[in-house]
Image (cartoon, grey):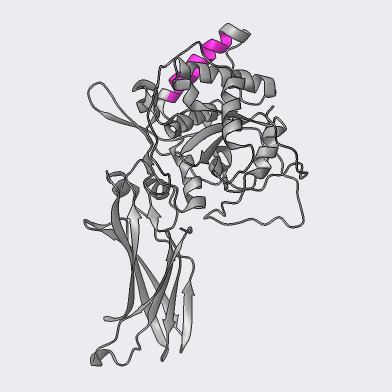
């Protein structure tokens, strides 16, 4: 399924009292899978609306848009106004229809809905369209449509959750024991220190005794309700995706840039050992990233190994299985990669973290970059004469500014 869906036009034939206004047809292109993450990040759900007027001009037509389910509207309806030219097509591209986060938060199970578009002139209906959509449960992630879904996965990485702060504190204690310094300072002391921080975070997570839960059979068909850091670290259970987004949140709070690798029926984590500029938050073209893994700029973490009991694991132990299983040979099984730091730059922010006190009171912690992530130092992009700034929604194509030469595969 593509990022947006095109719906062919429908017409409403006017009654005799409406003969002065010709019927129109309505075309809609919109996102078919709607989520709490989209609502929280205020991403418009309609790309464009085209009104085809086959007859005389209509001055001051009103176009009404809304998202509905069986219980009513989800968000505030939108009204636009346009003059419909004679035998002309009027295209509206700046359509500010957004979902209500509070309403999307209340959805507990996936259910159907519709995006409704109605064109009227005064009291007379001229045309309408109803686009079926899927409304996801509040914590659900579905890998459809691919590019937009990958970008929205970054919203489920919650460095603002109190359980992440506790995990980072535990890692700082381990760093003090092992290196003589508890400092968690991102990239300020070079890639070797980055590796030490990541090793401490993985060790702290391993010590939680998390049990592995099986992921869904398909990310695109059923998806998954993503567990919170509290569910994983304190409840001690999680799928591969759960453990990936939780460890990614800890890396982000430590000022290290995580990468979410989504493959067929599985997920694993990556991280930048050095800061590199990227153009967008998600990509399905992963070959350039594998080159950077080969160069040692990116390391991988198979987080399911953190749920196995034994004598512990080292960073090389965590890297090798992910590389050998997914990044050698054919890369078609890799669905895409999300750069969480770039997602934040593109204004894809974490969902609010919700916890309960001992008395049952719900506490909500909103994301604040200065508190929940040590900001990475700015990395100047190499200017080119073809640089183009793309508006949101994001293109989903990540182009890395790095050595363009193809390199042979081989783990570090």
Q: Is residue 171 within the magenta segment?
A: yes
Would residue 344 appear left or right of 291 to someone viewing this image?
A: left
Q: In front here: 20 or 150?
A: 150
Q: Residue at x 44, y 15 (%)?
A: 309
Most prominent secondary structure in the magenta stretch? helix
19 relative to 331, above or below: below
Q: Residue at x 43, y 44 (%)?
A: 219
Would residue 406 appear left or right of 372 to someone viewing this image?
A: right
Location of residue 71 (image quadrant): bottom left
Q: Residue 5 in the image: state x and y as whole percent.
A: 44, 64
Q: Residue 300 in the image: state x and y as whole percent.
A: 59, 29
Q: Residue at x 67, y 24 (%)?
A: 188
Q: In front here: 147 or 410?
A: 410
126 relative to 285, above or below: below
Q: In front here: 158 or 42?
A: 158
Q: Residue at x 41, y 29 (%)?
A: 161
Residue 371 appears in view: no
Quadrant for the C terminus, please: top right
42 relative to 21, above or below: above
Location of residue 362 (image quadrant): top left
Q: Residue 193 in the image: state x and y as whole percent.
A: 65, 19
Q: Is residue 400 within the magenta segment?
A: no
Q: Which residues are magenta?
A: 164-176
Would residue 314 appear left or right of 365 to someone viewing this image?
A: right
228 relative to 124, above or below: above
**Total numbered circles:** 0
Residue 337 appears in view: yes
Q: Residue 14 in the image: state x and y as whole percent.
A: 28, 87
């Amino acid at each position: 399924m593509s990022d947006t869906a095109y719906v062919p036009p429908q017409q409403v034939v006017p009654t005799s009292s409406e003969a002065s206004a010709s019927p129109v047809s309505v075309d809609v292109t919109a996102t078919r899978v709607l989520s709490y993450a989209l609502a929280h990040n205020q991403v418009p759900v309609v790309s464009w609306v085209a009104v085809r007027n086959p007859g005389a001009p209509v001055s001051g037509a009103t176009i009404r848009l809304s998202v509905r389910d069986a219980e009513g509207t989800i968000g505030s309806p939108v009204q636009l106004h346009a003059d419909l030219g004679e035998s002309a097509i009027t295209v509206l591209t700046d359509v500010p229809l957004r979902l209500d986060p509070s309403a999307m938060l209340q959805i507990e199970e996936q259910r159907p809905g519709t995006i409704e578009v109605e064109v009227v002139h005064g009291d007379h209906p001229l045309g309408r369209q109803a686009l079926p959509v899927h409304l996801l449960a509040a914590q659900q992630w579905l890998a459809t449509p691919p590019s937009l879904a990958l970008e929205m996965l970054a919203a489920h990485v919650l460095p603002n959750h109190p359980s992440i702060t506790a995990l980072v504190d535990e890692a700082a204690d381990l760093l003090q024991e092992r290196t003589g310094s508890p400092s968690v300072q991102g990239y300020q002391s070079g890639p070797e220190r980055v590796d030490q921080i990541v090793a401490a975070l993985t060790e702290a997570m391993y010590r939680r005794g998390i049990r592995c839960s099986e992921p869904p059979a398909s990310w695109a068909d059923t998806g998954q309700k993503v567990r919170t850091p509290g569910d994983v670290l304190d409840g001690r259970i999680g799928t591969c995706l759960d453990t990936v987004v939780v460890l990614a949140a800890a890396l982000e709070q430590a000022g290290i840039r995580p990468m979410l690798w989504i493959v067929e029926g599985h997920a694993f984590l990556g991280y930048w050992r050095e800061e590199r500029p990227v153009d967008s938050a998600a990509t399905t073209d992963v070959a350039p990233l594998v080159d950077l893994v080969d160069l040692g700029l990116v390391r991988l973490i198979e987080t399911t190994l953190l749920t196995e009991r034994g004598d512990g694991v080292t960073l090389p132990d965590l890297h090798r299985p992910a590389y050998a299983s997914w990044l050698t040979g054919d890369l078609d099984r890799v669905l895409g990669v999300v750069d969480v730091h770039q997602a934040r730059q593109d204004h894809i922010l974490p969902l609010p973290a919700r916890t309960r006190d001992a008395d049952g009171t719900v506490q909500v912690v909103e994301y604040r970059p200065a508190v929940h992530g040590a900001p990475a130092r700015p990395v100047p992009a190499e200017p080119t004469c073809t640089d183009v700034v793309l508006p949101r929604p994001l293109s989903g194509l990540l182009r890395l500014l790095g050595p363009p030469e193809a390199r042979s595969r081989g783990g570090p």
